[in-house]
């Protein structure tokens, strides 16, 4: 594969600005149909849309679909490119159940012909069959977790290195341009899972997803540049170009992107590329081990709850026994007090003297 520089976001949006204007009504309608701009804004739609048009892939792979923001914009780009197909992977059924019916009211039926929206475990994907004879691949890596990272870096990229490709990653911000939080604010260290409480900072990368760790490790080992969309838009566009894009595109343009990209095509052929190992069977075994551990943990928790319940019951019974003992001791003390009072009475003294007299004169106790 020849040494190639990837298409940049700034280059794409500048070269495709007229196409954005022509497509603005369709893009806005699709964006409103998805109705999930908190995940991807309209200006980010434009950035990925123009990137696809400029890169001109014959295959777009989408790892992580959700409600379908990127699904729509890439499918629209594929329709405009012509000889391009989109294969989308996700575990969610939101696209089929929520978004696709609304999109179908906007576009003709033929619009969906280039899209294959799969539901299921993408880790079991036959990657060679997926790639087929495609030679220009745009890969959106928007599914999170270390297992997905293993799959992308260990199973997909080795088959992409000899083809023209571009890998795009969402949910990573550039601290050089984005006003991201650096303080911990009483939070613990980041532990993954995108829980929103704290973000991870690696150099100028700010993220809450595991792939940020994986991609920094991978690009560092291979001396690859991890490009920032924000850096491209801030540094490659002249002030005049930025002003023209703002005036021409309005809400469809922003110099903030919050996404990164890279390509193995930048690596000279004579330099080695190091890939992590990937085994679907090993991942299944790991998942089984985690499930076993989870089951055992739940069993231990149930046993602990039962033990705590038994302890609480014994504690209650002990308290009841202690109360009964206190009541018995109080009753005994009361009886002893009555006996002492009786023995100290004049009647009791006379009774004792009478019995002593009877004994002295030889009378039996029954007389």
Image (spheres, rainbow, N blue to C red):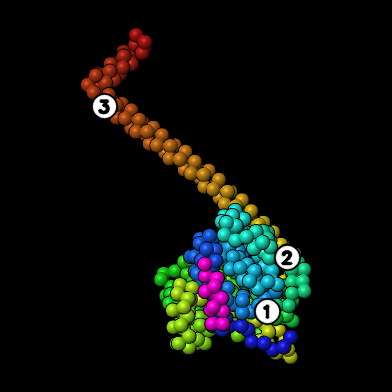
Disc assigned to residue 125: 2
Whether label 1 touches label 3, CB < 8 Å? no
Nearer to us: label 2 or label 3: 2
**What's the distance in space between the residues labelled 1 and 3, CA to CA?**
106 Å
**What's the distance in space between the residues labelled 1 and 2, CA to CA?**
19 Å
**What's the distance in space between the residues labelled 2 and 3, CA to CA?**
95 Å
Whether label 2 touches label 3, CB < 8 Å? no
- Above or below: residue 105 compared with residue 19: above
Residue extent of the magenta highlight:
14-25
Residue 227, given in percent of the width and then of the height, sits at 57, 82
Q: Which quadrant of the figure contains the C terminus?
A: top left
Whether residue 200 is visible here, answered yes or no, is: no
Determine which residue is flagged by label 3. 341
What SS does tag 3 mark?
helix
Determine which residue is flagged by label 1. 165
Q: Which quadrant of the figure contains the N terminus?
A: bottom right
Measuring 40% from the left and 37% from the top, which residue is drawn there?
Answer: 323
Magenta stretch, main secondary structure class? helix
Quick check: 155 left or right of 169?
A: right
Quick check: 133 left or right of 92?
A: right
């Amino acid at each position: 594969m020849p040494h190639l520089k990837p298409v940049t976001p700034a280059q794409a949006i500048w070269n495709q600005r007229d196409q954005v204007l022509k497509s603005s009504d369709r893009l806005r309608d699709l964006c409103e149909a998805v109705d999930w701009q908190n995940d991807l804004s309209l200006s980010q739609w434009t950035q990925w849309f123009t990137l696809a048009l400029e890169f001109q892939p014959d295959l777009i792979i989408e790892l992580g679909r959700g409600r379908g923001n990127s699904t729509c914009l890439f499918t629209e780009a594929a329709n405009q490119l012509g000889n391009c197909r989109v294969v989308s992977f996700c575990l969610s059924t939101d696209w089929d159940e929520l978004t696709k019916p609304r999109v179908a009211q906007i576009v003709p039926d033929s619009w969906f012909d280039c899209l294959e929206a799969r539901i299921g475990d993408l880790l079991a994907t036959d990657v060679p069959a997926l790639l087929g004879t495609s030679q220009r691949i745009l890969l959106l890596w928007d599914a999170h977790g270390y297992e997905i990272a293993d799959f992308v870096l260990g199973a997909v990229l080795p088959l992409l290195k000899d083809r023209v490709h571009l890998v795009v990653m969402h949910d990573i911000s550039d601290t050089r341009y984005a006003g991201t939080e650096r303080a911990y604010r009483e939070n613990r260290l980041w532990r993954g899972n995108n829980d929103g409480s704290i973000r991870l900072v690696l150099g100028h990368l700010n993220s809450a997803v595991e792939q940020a760790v994986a991609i920094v490790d991978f690009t560092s080992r291979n001396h690859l540049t991890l490009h920032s969309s924000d850096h491209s838009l801030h540094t490659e566009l002249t002030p005049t170009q930025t002003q023209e894009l703002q005036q021409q595109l309005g809400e469809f343009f922003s110099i903030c992107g919050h996404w990164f990209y890279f390509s193995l095509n930048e690596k000279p052929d004579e330099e080695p590329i190091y890939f992590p190992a990937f085994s679907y069977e090993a991942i299944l075994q790991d998942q089984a081990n985690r499930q076993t551990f989870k089951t055992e943990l739940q069993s231990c928790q149930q046993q602990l709850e039962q033990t705590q319940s038994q302890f609480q019951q014994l504690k209650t019974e002990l308290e009841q026994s202690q109360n009964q003992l206190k009541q018995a001791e109080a009753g005994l003390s009361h009886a002893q007090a009555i006996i002492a009072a009786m023995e100290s009475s004049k009647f009791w003294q006379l009774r004792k003297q009478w019995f002593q007299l009877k004994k002295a004169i030889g009378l039996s106790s029954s007389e």
